[in-house]
Amino acid sequence: MNVDDIVTEKIAAARARIAAAKKRRDDLHTARQRGLAHRHAAKLRHQANRGDAATVAGSPQDPADDRGPARTPENDTTEESA
């Protein structure tokens, strides 16, 4: 076995490692995308089952937002603003 054969084997091994790493990354990316799609679909199903009209917290359509008006300098009656 001469030096050229050794170099050729090392290059082939490096290419195999690179290909395996690329396949592993692609597999992980595919699994992540599938998981995200599944999670998003589940979220939409849960929202539909709950009957959420608004998906943004604190939106005017949100019936659970009964905290009253926001404090502004005009209607703030605390000691701090005086």
Image (tube, rainbow, N blue to C red):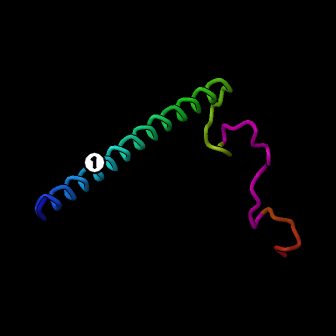
Element type where label 1 sits in the image:
helix
Residue 63 or residue 72, whichever sits in front: 63
Relative to 1, residue 38 above or below: above
In percent of width and height, residue 5 lies at 13, 58
Q: Is residue 78 above or below residue 65?
A: below
Q: Nearer the viewer, residue 63 or 48?
A: 48
In the image, residue 44 lies at what x, y percent?
57, 30
Q: Indicate the quadrant containing the C terminus: top left, top right, bottom left or bottom right.
A: bottom right
Taking depth in this image into account, of 48 and 21 the one nearest to the observer is 21
User: In this view, which residue lies farthest toward the bottom?
Assistant: 82
In this picture, is 60 found above or below 52? below
The magenta stretch spans which residues?
60-74
In the image as oriented, which residue stretches furthest toward the top?
49
The answer to whether residue 3 is left or right of residue 34 is: left
> Would you identify the image quadrant in which residue 42 lies?
top right
Instruction: Tell me which residue sits at (89%, 72%) in the image.
Output: 79
Position of the N terminus by quadrant? bottom left
Outermost residue on the right side: it is 79
Front-lying residue, 37 or 50:
37
Q: Residues within 10 Å of mark 1 (few under 14, many from 20)?
A: few
Task: Judge left or right: residue 11 versus residue 4.
Answer: right
- Mark count: 1
On the image, numbered disc 1 is attached to which residue? Answer: 19
Classify residue 74 by image quadrant.
Answer: bottom right
